[in-house]
Image: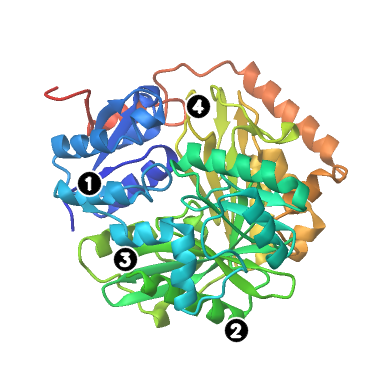
Amino acid sequence: MFHKILIANRGEIAVRVIRACREAGVRSVAVFSEADRDALHVRYADEAYLIGPAEASRSYLSIEAIVAAAGRSGAEAVHPGYGFLSENAAFARACAAAGLVFIGPPAEAIAAMGDKVRARKLMKEAGVPLVPGTEGPVASAAELRSQAAAIGYPVLIKAAAGGGGRGMRVVRSEGEAESALAQAASEAGAAFGNPAVYVERYIERGRHIEVQVLADARGAIHLGERECSIQRRHQKLIEESPSPMVDAARRQQLGEAAVRAADAVGYRGAGTVEFLVDAEGRFYFMEMNTRLQVEHPVTEMVTGVDLVKAQLRVAAGEASGLSQDDVALRGSAIECRIYAEDPDRGFLPAPGRIERLRVPGGPGIRDDSGVYEGYALPIHYDPLISKLVAWGETRAEAIARMLRALDEYMVVGVPTTLSFHQRALRDERFVRGELHTRFVEEMNGRPPLAGGRAELLKDLALIAAALAQGRTPAAGGDHRGGPSAWRAAGRRRQMEGPGR
């Protein structure tokens, strides 16, 4: 196992990886931008290095700065987390060139799956079902109209070099083709440095199902599926494992397809193969995320497998420690992403200072977070507060525990998505497992559920009580009151530049 690992990320995922390192007896190195000097991951790591200003392009996306920090720290390996450089083949190659182990798949696998058009060709050769679409990039509105006529409207324009909802547009008629193509290409170019797009059939009210894979030198296995259909702007809000629509036979089919996809590119480590399921239950390959997924905790909760530790073992040249026969799903887990966003204003980001914070606990509850009371969420990054996870022996128990945990959760100072999650989990369609990718749009068009006013009054009472107690001082106090507990640990050094 490694002696020291640098985590090339921030927020809750950096804290998550640092915790795994600590349990494995590995020293952790954090990196931070000027905006993250007071971030929890900086305080929790054994060492921390400043890598640039607040802009991600000059800090967390700077390959040169991160590799230089790894060199100064003496780290042997780099964990990319998710987002930022996690699916950047050039970063993986730069780590290798600097003598660092990249804790992820080979650069060739990242490049193969990062090019969505190339990935479709590889999956077709591997026998993985595909959504009907183009074999190459679409360069003009005339070509888009021709392809759409062959595929059948509506169609979906997608960025060839990225994902996460950017560079995507639905086209429902010929008249929308020109503007949709221009918008998608422009957004793709800005987000990924590549304006190329392709087209595939748009499946209305489909389900987004993804399969967790784990691969070592022996090949890949799968760890079941996750239901990720509840999304806004193609970004997931609620995930669960297992999916309420997947039975044992379908799970085996999905798992086998995901393993074929991973083996086709010589995959290593943890990754996710994403599928779209239509109303008839047919599933189609969407893309492969060549990294640890945001929603990996629900898989960990139902399988008992620590995916980050498995990543470390595989990257160190060891076996994952699992065979397919070792994998068994127990119970049900649900994850709610708690954002500093206003769900009543189109999920408008609203970063700011967290004045008061009460985190839920109790049986079956896990909260992966990168914030603390008194922390100011920077405006420069994703406004994620935490990933709240509830596990139960049954899906009904997991829902009940999540609702209890959401009721306990209190955040004062910024608007949050807590009320949205409460409403979603009480929706009768969610309870029945009738999920699809337009769930949020349809839910927001429905009248509020009964009891909403009572919940609002209770929230207002909690806020008033918290404010009546006064603000917690910025320094001192316990772990919840501020970062002083991390300072007292005495395990960290901050390096602010070469030779310092």
Instruction: Name the foreground residue: 252 vs 391.
Output: 252
- Residue 41 lies, with reference to residue 96, above or below; the image says above
The residues bearing labels 2 and 3 have C-alpha atoms spaced at a distance of: 26 Å
Q: Earlier in the sequence, mark 1 or mark 4?
A: 1
Residue 49 percent across, percent down from the top left: 25, 30
Is label 2 or label 1 in front? 1
Taking the spot 50% from the left edge, 44% from the top edge, the residue there is: 195
Q: What residue sits right under mark 1 in the picture?
A: 94
- Residue 452 lies, with reference to residue 117, above or below; the image says above
- Residue 409 lies, with reference to residue 280, above or below; the image says above
The residues bearing labels 3 and 1 have C-alpha atoms spaced at a distance of: 18 Å
The residues bearing labels 4 and 3 have C-alpha atoms spaced at a distance of: 34 Å
Q: Is residue 193 left or right of residue 351?
A: left
Q: In which quadrant of the rendered image does the C terminus lie? A: top left
Q: Which mark is residue 268?
A: 3
Q: Earlier in the sequence, mark 2 or mark 1?
A: 1
Helix, strand or loop at label 2? It is: helix
The amino acid marked with disc number 2 is Ala
Badge 3: residue crowd in 10 Å (few <14, some 14–19, many ≥20)? many
Instruction: Name the foreground residue: 462 vs 91.
Output: 91
Q: Earlier in the sequence, mark 2 or mark 3?
A: 2
Q: Which mark is residue 377?
A: 4
Taking the spot 67% from the left edge, 69% from the top edge, the residue there is: 244
Helix, strand or loop at label 4? It is: loop
Q: Which mark is residue 249?
A: 2
The amino acid marked with disc number 1 is Ala
- Residue 216 in view: yes
Is label 2 or label 3 in front? 3
